[in-house]
Image: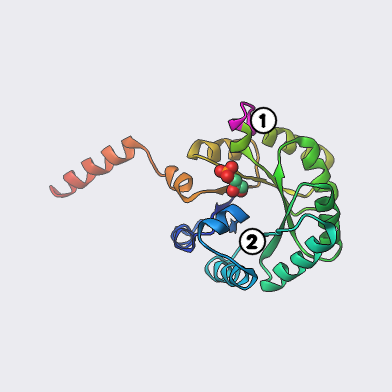
Amino acid sequence: MKFFIDTGNLAQIKEANELGILDGVTTNPTLMAQVGVKGEAAIAEHYKAICEIVNGDISAEVLSTDFATMVEEGKKLAAIHPNIVVKVPMIKDGIKAIKWFTDNGIRTNCTLVFSAGQAILAAKAGATYVSPFIGRIDDSSWDGMELISQIRHIYDVQGFQTQILAASIRNALHIVKAAEAGADVCTCPLDSILGLLKHPLTDIGLAKFLEDAKKM
Ligand code: G3P
């Protein structure tokens, strides 16, 4: 399973990248706004900066919702760097745009996916990635991980090549469960990635080893 970090924060991206296990970055308008990126030029510069830190796929989201504008926006985003993946919302014009990008050699990430039917449409349009939002499904008292399993099954049975990108990850257990359910990628906040490190027995064991090391 590939690890992406889900943030627009350059310091966090650097910290995750320094672990040596990072395969890419996802952003969205909320995450970009959180770090104060505003205006077309600043947005492009920010994506360029991310691409210079991480050698992997970087999702950059279109801000429009009609086919023609999404295509124009996506072409500009894709021109920023070869690693840019154009993130497109799961709406009717979004599917048309994903198909256009597929036919024109631009890779895509279909976002805001909450059902298996939407994931089938994204795959049919040739999306590189499909992003089911696990945490938000859990928030509405459904099981987000069930959706990952269902999409995995459908894609395997049908031979769809679209990669399942588990998104809206909220904790380390989500990462473990996404791996178990067969997600190709998990995009996570830094805290959730670092949460995988934690175990009290590791800390207790290390403290004892360090104490005994003094007697060696
Ligand atoms: O990748 C999608 C993600 O950023 C949404 O996460 O926590 O806002 O549901 P969240």
Secondary structure category for the residue under label 2: strand
Front residue of this view, candidates 208 and 146:
146
In the rendered image, residue 139 lying in the magenta stretch gets the answer yes
For disc 2, does the CB lie below 8 Å from ligand 1?
no
x and y percentages locating residue 19 in the rendered image: 45, 58
Judge from the rendering whether residue 95 lies leftward or rightward of residue 144; answer left or right.
right
Secondary structure category for the residue under label 1: helix
Check disc 2: other Cα within 10 Å, few if <14, some if 14-19, many if 20+.
some
Displayed-image quarter of ligand 1 = top right
Q: Quarter-wise, where is residue 108 in the image? A: bottom right
**Bounds of the magenta span?**
138-145
Residue at (56% x, 58% y) in the render:
33
Residue at (80% x, 47% y) in the render:
91
For this orientation, the residue located farthest to the left is 215
Residue 57: numbered disc: 2
Q: Quarter-wise, where is residue 70 in the image? A: bottom right
- Amino acid type of the residue that numbered disc 1 sits on in the rendered structure: Glu
Q: Are circles 2 and 1 on residues that touch, CB within 8 Å?
A: no
- Amino acid type of the residue that numbered disc 2 sits on in the rendered structure: Asp
Q: How many labels sit on residues? A: 2
For disc 1, does the CB lie below 8 Å from ligand 1?
no
According to the picture, the residue beneath numbered tag 1 turns out to be 146
Front residue of this view, candidates 26 and 184:
26
